[in-house]
Amino acid sequence: MTVVRGVVSGRIGRSSTSRRALEEAYRRLSLEALKREAAARGSFRASSWLRQYENDPNGFIREVLGPVWDTPTWKPWRTFISAVFALPFEDDEAFALYQRCTNRNHPPTQPFKEVWAPVGRRGGKSRVFALLAVWMAVCHDWSKYLVPGEEGMIPVIADARDRALQTMGYVKAALSHPKLKDMVVSDLSEEVHLKNNVIIRVATASIKAARSRTVLSALCDEIAFWVSDELKANPDKEIIRALRPAMLTIPISRLFCLSSPYARRGMLWEQYRNYFGRDDPRVLVWQGDTQTMHPTVDMFEIDRAYKDDPTAASAEYGALFRTDVETILTLEIVESCVITGRYELAPMPRTVYKAFVDPSGGSSDSMTLAIAHFDTETERTVLDLVREVKPPFSPEAVVQDFAATIRQYGLVSVRGDRYAGEWPRERFALHGVSYEISERSRSELYQAVIPLFNSRKVELLDDRTLINQFVGLERRTRASARDLIDHAPGGHDDVANSVAGAITEVAYAGGEIWSRPWTFTPTTGPSTGSAVLYAQQAQQRGRFMR
């Protein structure tokens, strides 16, 4: 390059034509240099040490972990890996374990494209996940599938950020091996870039995690518990549907989905139901309880869990899908109650409204408010307003804002649950609103609205969070024979709770003191003072009429 620059600026530069020709030549040389550099990086070849493990994942993990990988503790996972990649089993005991965990009679003849594994908690799956991710990243020649300059992704998707970061810790520990650390180009908190144009990235369950770059292989951790308010029902389906096309051009790509099982729904359950015990050449389902996958685990706590709650323990540690959990509202039922394009209704004169609030301290859960009324013409309960303030926030500021909104609808009372203690009553009273404790529990509110949804006796606002939270509710049968309705593990129901409360108070209002038949003329009301005094003053001023 320097020679060309010298010529351009030197004696030959006297001719403008020659100068332009040489500048163009320099430009072409620079471009070719960039292309060669990209091609060299894109065509990175692993060392002979790595290439020997291209078809030997167990050997690679043995090299990384050391002799511990050959101990009986890890034999179930060595057998699992042998089954996934159609490698010879160690002995008859390993083959018997394969038969028991897959319900298959014949050994595999080719590697599987997809692996679904309901495995008990503390079975070691996250650590094995990380080791498999590193093996796939460094021991395969991906250059034949990636164009020069293109980067391939191996996403490790988990149900929660802390679990994803824990998995990344295992990945980085493996890459710290003396023969692997030189492969690392950049080491970030949630992703590692390697010299062979491969990125190992951990992420929480979202569509964005699946819709970026070419996916070489994907590992989905705790997929049975993936919950997202941003997606429609069954976010696991949406993410898997995005991952499969991203791996379409990579013939040796693999999809691993491991999780403790939960309810009989979602992708893990569907794949288990469709493929467990079937000799499908592309999809393997492996079911292993905690003791099977981790033979040296302390059984004291597991035995105690079975005594306390056999059904829950059978899912947590026994790798069995729960039979006592079911969804209560389908997406179709909830969406049939939604008025498309209606996001909020303004206060109307001479209308009886009811308000319900789900308080929060401002650090973890949202604080929500819902207001509803009964439409005598359609004979339906109508949801007028939903407010959600996500943490972090100042509870005092939110109460002040909610109280002002409540008064705009002519109300001096709001209902909420008793679990927030005395602070909502005191805070709302300072802003002219009386906080009344609901006689119904959260679960009872949900039980009350189910028939209203099923009979289309309610009109909902077009709010995706509201829809998803109602669809995400599930019924659990308890030992007391009383069903409990609540959100799924890792889910939220703050919006659904306040909406259910408002709807229930309108639909089942008969005879209650707080639902006396006042109609209202819009007013802003005072910002402070006693709620009771304000109610008396409002009546004297004629704002409420019988």
Image (tube, rainbow, N blue to C red):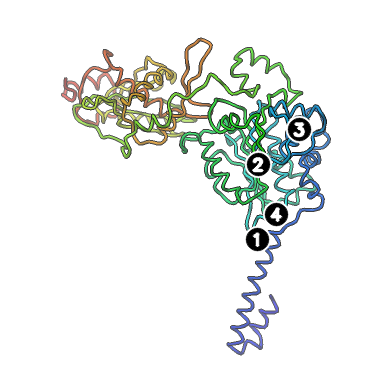
Mark 1: amino acid: Pro
- Give the labeled residue for mark 4: 196
Sequence-earlier tag: 2 or 1: 2
Sequence-earlier tag: 3 or 2: 3
> Observer-nearest residue: 189 or 27?
27
Q: Residues within 10 Å of mark 1 (few under 14, many from 20)?
A: some
Q: Residues within 10 Å of mark 3 (few under 14, many from 20)?
A: many
Mark 4 element type? loop
Mark 3: amino acid: Thr
Mark 3 element type? helix
Distance, label 2 to label 1, CA atoms, is: 26 Å
- Outermost residue on the top side: it is 480
- Give the labeled residue for mark 1: 148
Mark 2 element type? loop
Relative to 254, residue 460 above or below? above
- Give the labeled residue for mark 3: 79
Distance, label 3 to label 4, CA atoms, is: 29 Å
Mark 4: amino acid: Asn
Sequence-earlier tag: 3 or 4: 3
- Give the labeled residue for mark 2: 113
Sequence-earlier tag: 1 or 4: 1
Image quarter hosting the N terminus: bottom right
> Observer-nearest residue: 5 or 41?
41
